[in-house]
Amino acid sequence: MHKLKILVIEDDKLAQAVMAKHLVAHSVDFADNKTAALKLIKNGSYNLYFVDLKLGKDDDFSGLTLLPSIKERGGYAVVMSSSDDEETVNKAYAFGCRDFYVKGNESENVALILAKYKHGNTLKNAEDIFSTEFITRDTETRQAVLDAFKYAPTGIPLLLLGPSGTGKTRLARLLHERSGREGAFVAINCSAYTEDLLEAELFGYRKGAFTGAQENRKGKLAQADRGTLFLDEIGSMSHNMQTKLLKAIEERVFYPVGSDKPEHSDFRIISATLENLQKLISNGKLRFDFFQRIHGYTVSLKPLCQRKDDIFPLIASLTKTGKRMSFSADAKAFLLEHKWPGNIRELKKFVELVSASEGVITLATVQKYLVQAVSCEDERVSLLTDTQYACALKLGLSETLDRMAWEIISRNLQENDGNKTRTMDQLKISTRALYSTIKKYGGEDGSEN
Amino acid sequence: MEVKIEAGKLLHDLESKTASLKGAVKLLRECQPDERREMLTLMKTAAQEISSCLTELEKLDG
């Protein structure tokens, strides 16, 4: 966070020392009475003001009368007072304070206020975020991100939903950066580990806990102390693991594998999944109490096919530091019509592939590289289009699959200038399958020649 | 009535000073030796003021 100019209006010397320590990274002035405070408010230009209401032993809440002057100068006033009766709180807000905190928990509240202040400024520069850190022109997506940012400086667990490649990890990192939390952003993909390995990764382990544990190792929970723990693909976590993690989330205490000594970590949870959580709960795959612990606020990110306006800004961003590209009109239209089942990840791969081509990028080039960019190794990427589904309902599954097979074969034959051997090789099909499809749809006799 | 106002002020001072003291205690571990000495001096002063407040409250209760 850049250095802020802060005025602390506080008569108590010990409270001043406490605030000085919490604000050590910033430029701070102090005023211990109304007159000195007014002078500094009028002559200085502060970003943030911390105001105690009672300035001196017999003072009659003169801090309140400073609030309008701060408001006039466009300052952000935060009252920190021991007087928190309803009347005083109402008066403080009416006089122009932006936040009111009761004294006594500065170690948490000051960090929260600083993060909130920074967040407020961030929101003012929202356009910058959407053209740099999270590229989108889509109104709904922008709103979803801005709404999520409101919860960034809080401890509320956040749940990010959306298909693979829609920017969940990017958003989680942005939320951490806006959280004001001093610790690290620690990410783990829960689907990449078996249950035992996931436990060791999350909780850490002691030397000798299992074969191969040759030394003590810190787990992700400990690494995320005072930071953020990002649990990606949370839906793939086993019941047993959910139970163990639930306990750690509730108590912020856990046991590394092979240790009977509890460890503490103050981590904030952000989790993500592409699965339907309600379905997982009803199927009994996700514990309801675990779900309750991870879904304080939910953010849904739309797939790229529903954010067509983002395709070309994303391409421009992905090529910002490298070769810029020009697409023919029909190539552009094709890119806009494409379903992008792998979302931004697929787009990124496509850009990497297509950037090797020369001159204006044609429709044929786009079609060629889009095929290669599809991440079909990922079983969760849907290959089904609405047209295919409608055909299956109308013609039956078998007939639809045959027709799809023919379309795939005929396109591949075209791309290979009619070379059947190459088509059989590329599509991994038998001679019999190739010729029977050609016979049925291609008008040839289907004989091998 | 005056006794009630005076007691109110004393209680406010007590709340304020104990809050500062609590905040300072939380910070002590992170302080460098010089800062720690300075903080401890301020904390002792605050503790004496808390004690004075308590005495005044006792007097008011008569």
Image (cartoon, coloured by chain):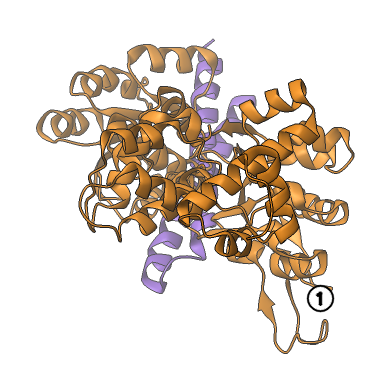
Q: Can residue A364 be seen in this view?
A: yes
Whole-percent x, y for residue A273 in the image? 66, 43
* Chain B as rendered: colour: purple
Question: In the image, is B40 to the left or to the right of A155?
Answer: left
| Chain given the colour orange | A
Classify 10 Å Cα crowding around label 1: few (below 14), some (14-19), many (20 and above). Answer: some
Please determine whether, in this image, residue A418 is positioned above or below residue A216: above
Q: Is residue A425 above or below residue A250?
A: below
From the viewer's perspective, is A447 left or right of A3?
A: right
Residue on which disc 1 sits = A259
Q: Where does the C terminus of chain A fall, quadrant-wise?
A: bottom right
At a point 56% along the width and 60% down the height, the residue shown is A186
Which x, y percent locates residue A118? 34, 39
Residue A164 seen in render:
no
Nearest the eye: A265 or B10: A265
Q: Residue furthest bottom?
A: A214
Q: Is residue B35 above or below residue A53?
A: below
